[in-house]
Amino acid sequence: MKPQDQQGGGSRAAKKRAKKKKKNKQPQPSNEEDRKELVETTKSKSESKKRPLEEKDVAGHSAKNKSSKKDNAEKKKANGGGGILKKPKYSSEGASTKNSNTAEEDQLEDTEENNMQEEELQNLDAQDLDVLLPQEIQELITSDKFSLQDLLLLPSDKKKKQSTTSKSAQKSNKDVEKMVDEDNSVQNPFQELTSKQRARCALNILLAPSNICAEEFYEEYWEKKALCVQVQKDKNKKHHKHRFDGFLSLKSIRQWTERHTLHYGRDLNVTRYHTLTPGQPKRRANIDPPPYQDNKTGETKYVQADSSFVWEQYDEKKATVRLLCPHKHNDTIHSLLSLFELEWGCMVGANAYLTPPGGSQGFAPHYDDIEAFCLQLEGRKRWKVYAPPKEARLPRVSSEDFTDEDMMEQEPVLDVVLEPGDFLYMPRGWVHQGITLPGNEHSLHLTMSAMQQWAWVDYLELLMPEALEAAANSETSISLRKGLPRNFLDYMGAMYDQRDDDLLPDKLKEGGKNKEGEKEGNDNDNDEGDGDGAKEDYEEAQRQRLALMQENFREEAKKRIMRVAKEAMDMVDAACDQIGKRFLSDRLPPGLTAEELAGTTEGQKDAKIWPTTLCRLSRPGIARLVLEDGKAVLYHCADNSRVFHERALEPMEFEVDDAPALEQLITTVEPEWIPVSDLIHEGMGDKIAIAQALYDEGILAIVNPEGGLA
């Protein structure tokens, strides 16, 4: 399974603007008492509220929602000037002034609301608190009016471009429009949800026919066991059969290969699982030409696909056509994957598999290094799924191909036939194979992939080398730079370790037994006497001395390991930033909805930022703020390509004292907004400049108070 094709970078203009920003450094309190007084003063300020957009926000802001320059300067000083790694949560500091009565009323209101929700939320996982779904939405998920495509809220211009929309999907869209006419509500009920809520809805739609909710799926199945959801087990089979319509079809794939320039190995593969030589086991064979290296440039070149050859292999040779990363050319699939990146918080990719009828099979039995989510779009395919080998539970790499002989003694955990609307989930390491049924029915399914190289071990691979280097170069401790004990190899190693013979290799066990036998034989040959007792005492003393030396070495090693571990614990957040940057580099550009686009530079050109302008990140999680070389550096994926790593990241660089305002902006997400005047900074001009830079970069959505969008 290949990862999805995308990577991104930022605008050079915005980057230069951010670098050119010069700040007048605010003087720090002169002594410790002043600092303490300033911290207490800051703590006594009421908290700045991020709030949902309401009518009063558009019309203007009351005095209680405005903050003075003096207050903001004090807050910045109390935060130490913006040390982002040590104190990242600037947005919790107060940025508005209120009279005491208003503050007490707000506090009472918040307390009552918290008490009402406390019992309901106490058993929920923290990461699920922002994806709670209204009851009416939960009911809509299992209704017969909406498909998975309706959830994506594609902009109308992109819907028109989709050549893959089927009649059933078009009928679903008409049902939505009809619903609007009847009750004069919003165009689509999912528009009222946040993007994280829609992402959770997408997972629940996949699971809907099984009556398993997302929470149960994560608890019982995620990374643990395979799950097959079949529409035939649900009463609403007619609806669920078409719930995946509008993504791909046999017809659209034929048109796509005929109208576009595609390349083998980069855009598609043609493959078969069959007997290459009579009497030999079946093997998978890629029929398409492999890539080659340009002799002049050394660049890898891919052979251009011949459409007539591809379909000849499909129609006559019963070969499977695998579309690699179809989201590169398909907005609907791109939007779906972008939504699931919000749900899973990792890179999500996709491949599509078109297998001809008549018992055809494109791939040998194998397991993958990804969590696989298979959506059956057309036709039927029989799947056999096997529990993972013990040595391959949650593997880091995909397996080599197995043969039919390898699988003969293995009993499948699942042996199912997927039909349109069915869904199959397989964790990493679960062996699987699929074959079409006899007859004239082809199979088309879309496989979404997640969690590739996204395990604790991948995180620790980033963290531990940095921790080791930091501990080794410590100015306060030289323990890791001290030399190893003299001649420690004379008593350390497997050949000297007798603590647990069961852990020793067989050869060493035999060697030890032979030595003991020789010793016993020698003892029997020797005459009894005082010399024998002295020799035994000496040997016992030597053994005890050896054991003590081994124990001392292990204790010294343990101390140094713990020293590195302590250093690692101090670097946990920094390592999270590093893997977060990797995620931003790998992931897709956000598939924004029409409403999300309307607030960005895509929806309103040349908009200006004012003190009353309301701001928020255009999509949660698309930007990350880190501290590097004494600068506040902002990474984002808004300019990413759908082609994997096609462009390098180009972060925006700011002064460190811009960090509090930057963090407020990128942590304010739907349904909340924050006015520019509430940003933590000493000058209004700086606040406006920071917000303008992020808006021009395309990652900030804004609303101006004059009447809505700028």
Image: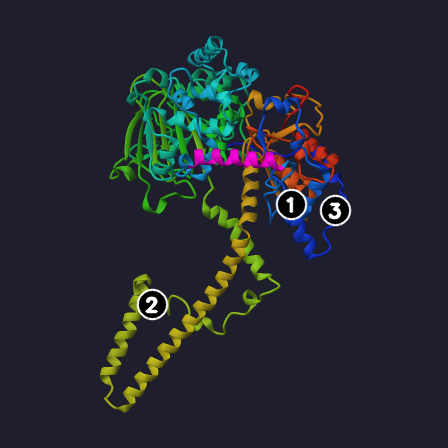
> CB of mark 1 within 8 Å of CB of mark 2?
no
Q: Which residue is drawn at 34% across and 15% down?
A: 238
Q: Distance between the residues labelled 2 and 3?
A: 63 Å
> CB of mark 2 within 8 Å of CB of mark 3?
no
Judging from the image, what secondary structure is the residue with disc 2 in?
A: loop
Above or below — where is 560 with respect to 531?
Answer: above
Q: Is residue 112 magenta?
A: yes
- Residue 508 horizontal/vertical position (percent): 33, 66
Q: Is residue 333 left or right of residue 534?
A: right
Judging from the image, what secondary structure is the residue with disc 1 in?
A: helix
Which is more foreground, mark 3 or mark 1?
1
- Residue 310 horizontal/vertical position (percent): 45, 22
What is the magenta range?
A: 100-118
On-image quarter of the C terminus: top right
Q: Does the magenta stretch include residue 153?
A: no
The foreground one among 511 and 689 is 689
Q: Name the residue under label 1.
A: 42
